[in-house]
Amino acid sequence: MASGTVMTAAELEDFLREVFPQAFGPTRPHHVVALGHRTATIRLDADDAHLRPGGTVSGPALMALSDVAVYAALLGQIGRVALAVTTNLSINFLRKPAPGPVFADARIIKLGKRLAVGDVALRGGGSEDLVAHCVATYSIPDKR
Amino acid sequence: MASGTVMTAAELEDFLREVFPQAFGPTRPHHVVALGHRTATIRLDADDAHLRPGGTVSGPALMALSDVAVYAALLGQIGRVALAVTTNLSINFLRKPAPGPVFADARIIKLGKRLAVGDVALRGGGSEDLVAHCVATYSIPDKR
Amino acid sequence: MASGTVMTAAELEDFLREVFPQAFGPTRPHHVVALGHRTATIRLDADDAHLRPGGTVSGPALMALSDVAVYAALLGQIGRVALAVTTNLSINFLRKPAPGPVFADARIIKLGKRLAVGDVALRGGGSEDLVAHCVATYSIPDKR
Amino acid sequence: MASGTVMTAAELEDFLREVFPQAFGPTRPHHVVALGHRTATIRLDADDAHLRPGGTVSGPALMALSDVAVYAALLGQIGRVALAVTTNLSINFLRKPAPGPVFADARIIKLGKRLAVGDVALRGGGSEDLVAHCVATYSIPDKR
């Protein structure tokens, strides 16, 4: 594929809708913004379940967003492997997010046979300042 | 207080219900099981929002549970400080949890003026094997 | 073996002397104190190369000590596998160590076919307070 | 200063030579390559003490290099604060480094009053592939 991925962003969104019906889909909060060579951007349109008093997106919502963004970037390289599982996730919360959508820019920094590692920059819509930064490791099942 | 905490488990649960109404309360999935000197145990009765196909508790649900367990153990030492915020959380996912409740045993390993660090062992109801292990750091606001 | 390990502490020390001659050996700073079922304790007798001004053991010396302690606990379970490699290490520095030896108590919390995870409590000789706390993941090579 | 730092690379190297005489200096293995706005690059010319059999730079040497690279980028912003201390360091080892120097490109992603967070990309001389990736948090002492 010209873009350096094994599926398009639309195909990825279809797959994520299937495996995470609570997260992806027309009325759901997560959306695939872009998919590139070893990269993916996911947008979270936080609803009440993701907000803290004051309109700030909660820590667990940012962790879930980070996790799925690395998974998305990985699927763009290895295809529909629902069984890839997170083995480690480490996140630093840097600033309180402003109200509005949060974008997660994920990048795969290692793609091995058994393990993949990605980092994620989380930012609000109107600023380059990072809201959070995350690194996650996925275990890739053996081919059968 | 005899128990080595500044509040009882019931007082803690009341406070958590106030600040996290979606997580704690009679019909909500999280419950304070125990509060001790620098320790807390929180139980997650996972509902559909926390489950993956197959009945397994999702990674984000385990991250949220870990985060609140360290926060609970910290509040037992420093009292109702809603503004303590997580600055770093690192989790290793070790085994697929069996269906049923998940318990998070948190322990504060450093209680400084500015930072507190806790670790958390997550386990299912019927086994000593860890489902996940987490370390989280909280920033404690200056006293006013 | 009665102790729940595949080698004795003396056999482990011999092997570590072979693969890390700069760290283990009669005149070297690291020593195997104990080896048990999924556990190991390593002692660091810090010399000038490990000290900061004021006599405090340096951060990198504590990281190296943590890494080798998890490796030791792992070797006690799987035998002489020099090729097991650290894939992730996360450490929290909690208190300035007092002058004198530092002990690293490692414990394997997951022993899978491909990955092992261990945590480590680092403490000085005369106190139960943790100097640092570390979690490390090792990748285990396929059997040939 | 035009470069967006409070000191030059040469001033930084002088200071690091003072506080880490074993690491920096004409005959020592670490060197300041560049210092920019919230960034620093440190080069490690590994000597025998940093090598594993086969000529590969050891994990502890990469951890020490990462730690000092974030510290350098931080000092470029806040000046000679020897007492800033690492509170957390998390590193992923991605590939075996080729023989030769290792470069650590550090970038401060949060510079708060009490905490600074930086990430570090480690790479060999002849490749863009990352050898390791690290995130470290520093605690900044109160001004007196």
Image: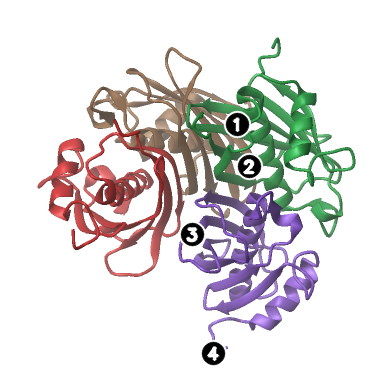
Chain colours: A green, B purple, C red, D brown
User: What's the residue at 57%, 55% (across, down)?
Assistant: D142
User: What's the residue at 41%, 33% (across, down)?
Assistant: D65
* Residue found at the far right of this picture: A27
Residue A87 locus on image (x, y percent) = 53, 44
**Vertical side of B98 occupied by A143: above or below:** above
Estimate the spatial distance between the alpha carbons at disc 3 and disc 4, rounded to whole Å. 30 Å
Within-10-Å neighbours for mark 2: few <14, some 14–19, many 20+ = some
Q: Which mark is residue B130?
A: 3
Estimate the spatial distance between the alpha carbons at disc 1 and disc 2, rounded to whole Å. 9 Å
Towards the viewer: B48 or A2: B48
User: What's the residue at 78%, 44% (across, down)?
Assistant: A23
Estimate the spatial distance between the alpha carbons at disc 3 and disc 1, rounded to whole Å. 40 Å
- What is the chain letter for disc 1? D
- What is the chain letter for disc 4? B
Number of the front mark, 4 or 2: 4
Which residue was labeled with disc 4?
B2
Q: Earlier in the sequence, mark 1 or mark 2?
A: 1
Which residue was labeled with disc 1?
D38
